[in-house]
Image (cartoon, grey):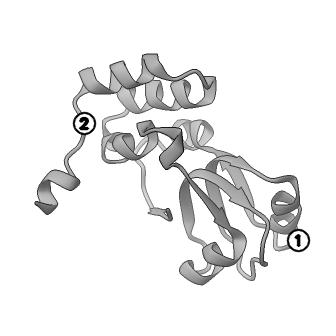
Amino acid sequence: MEKLANHALSKTKLKIRMHKKTNPKLAAAIFLVLKNPAWNKYAKLLSQSTRNHSSINLEEIDKQTSLGDTILVPGKVLSLGEITKKIKICSFGISNEALERLKKTRSEWSSIVDEIKKNPKAEGLKIIK
């Protein structure tokens, strides 16, 4: 059963999901995932329904990370809590207050589309849902 849960989606199903998306950021991310085979293991997570996307607070991220991690959040980052380490967060969105708190620790934020372009081999990513 675990093998089925981790099974990557076919390109055809990804294309169908991409055409159903009305958010251009989501559609662009799915399009780039189709082009980069290393990102296929994240394709199902990124192309799922937006209702299933997560909203993660900085407090949760701080508990689950260590210094220098690159975090992938399929959803939005919210501002509750503080970050105590320098990390890089990639998500579909971030609140303004969370972005300010990240700047205090010199942490970085980038959109998932930018991360796919900068890191085509998908190296060093840690998923937090």
Secondary element type, mark 2 = loop
Mark-to-mark CA distance, 1 and 2:
39 Å
Q: Check the image and report above or below for 109 versus 20.
A: below
Which residue: 62% across, 79% down? 67
Eyeballing the image, is 123 above or below 11?
Answer: below
Q: Residues within 10 Å of mark 1 (few under 14, many from 20)?
A: few
| Observer-nearest of 122 and 18 | 18
The amino acid type found where label 1 is placed reads Lys
Q: Position of residue 23 (x, y in %)?
A: 61, 26
| 90 relative to 123 in the view: left or right | right
Question: Label 2 belongs to which residue?
Answer: 9
In the structure shown, which secondary structural element does the residue marked by tag 1 occupy? helix
Amino acid under disc 2:
Leu
- Disc 1 target residue: 104
Residues under numbered marks 1 and 2 in contact, where contact means CB atoms less than 8 Å apart: no
Residue nearer the viewer, 6 or 40: 6
Q: Quadrant of residue 105?
A: bottom right
Residue placed at 44% from the left, 16% from the top?
Answer: 19
